[in-house]
Amino acid sequence: MPQPTSPNVTEVTELSKKIISNVEQAIVGKRKQLVLSLVAWFSSGHILLEDVPGVAKTMLARALAKSVGCKFKRVQCTPDLLPSDISGTSIFNQKSGEFEFRKGPLFTQLFLADEINRATPRTQAALLEAMAESRVTVDGTTYQLEAPFLVVATQNPVDHEGTFPLPEAQLDRFLMRFSLGYPSLEEELRMLELLQVHHPIDGLKPVATAQQLVTCQTAVRHVHVDRLVREYILQIVHDTREHEDLALGASPRATIALFRCAQAMAAIRGRSFVQPDDVKRIVGPVMNHRIIVRPESRLRKITAEKVMESILGEIAVPTVGEA
């Protein structure tokens, strides 16, 4: 097995520390969610933030973009939002006598789809190609999106009036789903102090470049995953397909997601190899939105979180050495 650290992994670790420290100047008490966000970004995945309004979901996305000097654009999703409103459209230029493509807000590096479940399924589907392949096709022409490309979508889990729930196929496209949660009393007091004169996000400066983040995405792919850890990941996913409380288990895409995220988590924590603990840390955000609990099990207060906890508790954790 490779040595515990390498220059590439060290670069990922140091960059993570810089970004987290910078974002925490504007976002208080969300270290765990910041780490998960970087895991998703380093894994070239996308994030679904599901939480109540006013807990800094948009601020988190803006702070991440500012910290890396990436282009940032935000779209407020509504039922009348059209696919062309986000991807762009061709407009006839009377002077040239030709159609010209006007790029939409999707042509950025960090794209925030606020309240994505308020957009129609047709508009939601317009994001699929961009999320899966980092490109957009309009009028038969394909345009490559600028790296590193990250979609952060938000939705309110409480207010369902006038919404269009994301179908399972689209939920599966998000590498991770997690929430920010309410701040503690001390954290909210600190937040009031920071906001007294102006919003701290306005003063955030880049601490890294987009190219550095792309380099880290490449470095993460070379983090070693022992055969025992691979089998551990496979067993977790396989058990969801046979669990009595689940109507739908996780797909092979979930296996790849666990694999990639475990690599990124290991690199962020300063190792060039994955330990089972890295897998455990990201199982919930990666897996909970990819499984469906049976209706009769939901009546017994069984949730996706509880199912994954029981699966993890039943699988023997492999012992992986450092040498």
Image: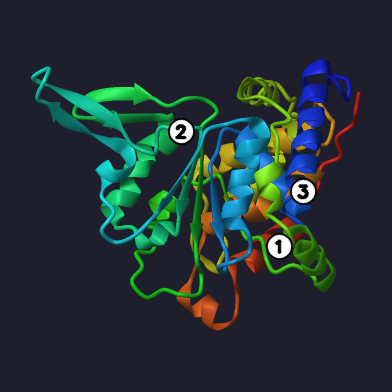
Give above or below for 157 relative to 85.
Answer: below
Residue located beneath label 1 in the image: 309
Q: Residue at x 66, y 20 (%)?
A: 215
Whichever of callouts 2 and 1 sits on the residue coming sooner in the sequence is: 2
* Amino acid type at image mark 1: Glu
Tell me how far mark 1 sits from mark 3, CA to CA: 30 Å
* Amino acid type at image mark 3: Glu
Residue located beneath label 2 in the image: 108
Q: Residue at x 67, y 51 (%)?
A: 283
Q: Which percent across, then down, holds residue 322?
A: 90, 28
Q: Badge 3 local density, few (<14 within 10 Å), some, or many (20+)?
A: some
Q: Which percent across, then down, holds residue 225?
A: 73, 29
Q: Quadrant of the N terminus?
A: top right
Tell me how far mark 2 sits from mark 1, CA to CA: 37 Å
Q: Badge 1 local density, few (<14 within 10 Å), some, or many (20+)?
A: some
Left or right of residue 21: residue 214 = left
Q: Badge 2 local density, few (<14 within 10 Å), some, or many (20+)?
A: many
Whichever of callouts 1 and 3 sits on the residue coming sooner in the sequence is: 3
Q: Which percent across, then down, holds residue 148?
A: 55, 28
Residue 274 seen in render: no
Circles 2 and 1 in contact, beta carbons < 8 Å: no
Tell me how far mark 3 sits from mark 2, CA to CA: 24 Å
Q: Which percent across, then down, holds residue 238?
A: 58, 49
Q: Quadrant of the C terminus?
A: top right
Residue located beneath label 3 in the image: 24
Circles 1 and 3 in contact, beta carbons < 8 Å: no
* Amino acid type at image mark 2: Thr
Q: Residue at x 76, y 66 (%)?
A: 192
